[in-house]
Image (cartoon, rainbow, N blue to C red):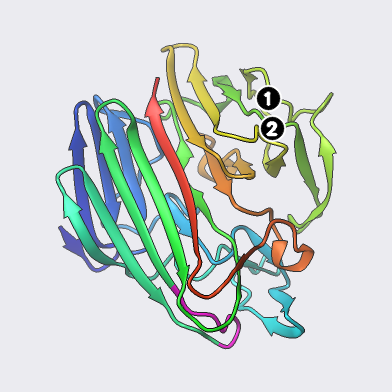
Amino acid sequence: MHNAVNGTVITLEAGDYRAQLASVGATLVSLTRSGRDLVLPFPATELPTAYKGKILLPWPNRIEAGRYSYAGVDYQLPVNEVETGSAAHGFVTWLNWEVSGQGPTSVTFSLFLPPQRAYPFALRLETTYTLDAEAGLVCRVVAENIGEQTAPYGVAVHPYLTCNQAPLDRCLLLVPASSYLEVDENLIPTGEVSVDGTDYDFRTARTVADTMIDNAFGQLPPEEWNVDLTDPETAMTVRLTSDERWLQIYSADQLGRPGVAVEPMSCPPNAFNTGVDVVELSPGQLSTLSYSIREI
């Protein structure tokens, strides 16, 4: 299926799982198991709100005032989030990726990101979604520097987990992070603090209640980690698994809190200015982010 809003929309099926992916933004449109929503969906012919299912690169989250310096050169990115005065979520969310590979249970989207004044680095990008009857949805985002100079790079993904759109306030959330980043009024980090004794300690699953969250979390387990969302009324649990060093959690307040954004990130917000965990992508080097979503 093709439409003028989200490009080519592809449906994958495996066992009880069904997923829809769109070429614009290499976006996760929907994911269900036995008809139950595991991520917040959007109509495939309409613009998604709140970056639902998007790929975020070559930087995730926000860069303060859209300004950064790299290798002694100052750059000004477009400020596309007026309310915070930030450059948010990279360049590729609204670009149409090429469908470069497709099978009954997988699809690969590819994109050439050319150098531009605010980011003069050339990247070849590939996002592959695979659906498995046991493992659920697996996503792999690969960036290759095909230019001649080292590029600063960061990546994240933006799925919203949901237990079939049960109210977030009644759900249990498990996040195995020992720290979080405090932020200013523009959601720019001001410091990393322990979750001990705060409303952001979800190392043991607990009810979200009315907690409002739009923060990055760190000090995750060094290998693979899981974030679980559980609806106690139906005993439905949705799990996101990744091994990235950072994680953004957003309680989807502007959407009415029917789920929670769980965003594995290679680096924290404003990383192009702080330098924290920015990938120095050398010519010919690859960088990969992977995550999976399934019902357990």
Q: Amino acid under label 2?
A: Ala
Judge left or right: residue 78 versus residue 29.
right
Q: Quick check: can you spot residue 44?
A: no
Callout 1 touching callout 2 (CB < 8 Å): yes
Q: What quarter of the picture does the C terminus occupy?
A: top left
Would you say 30 lies left or right of 116 here? left
In the picture, measured across the screen, residue 143 lies left or right of residue 87, that is: left
Magenta region includes residue 121? yes
In the structure shown, which secondary structural element does the residue marked by tag 2 occupy? loop
Precedes in sequence: disc 1 or disc 2 = 2
Front in this rendered view, residue 282 or 86: 282
Q: From which residue to which does the magenta span run? A: 117-123
Secondary element under disc 1, as helix, strand or loop, is loop
Label 1, on which residue?
Answer: 202
Instruction: Indicate the quadrant where residue 154 lies.
Output: bottom right
Residue 41 is marked as none
Q: Residues within 10 Å of mark 1 (few under 14, many from 20)?
A: many
Give coordinates of residue 208: x percent, y percent: 63, 24
Q: Give me the C-alpha separation between circle 1 and circle 2.
A: 8 Å
Q: Which residue is nearer to you in this view: 31 or 50? A: 31
| Residue depicted at x 29% and y 51% | 21
User: Which numbered marker is on residue 177?
Assistant: 2
How crowded pointer 2 is (Cα within 10 Å; few <14, some 14-19, many 20+) is rated as many
Q: Image height check: is 65 above or below 207?
A: below
Q: Position of residue 26 (x, y in %)?
A: 35, 59
- Amino acid beneath label 1: Phe
**Residue 8 seen in the current view:** yes
* Magenta highlight on residue 280: no
Residue 133 rendering spot, x and y as whole percentages: 24, 28
Residue at (26%, 33%) from the top-left corner? 132
Q: Nearer the viewer, mark 1 or mark 2?
A: 2
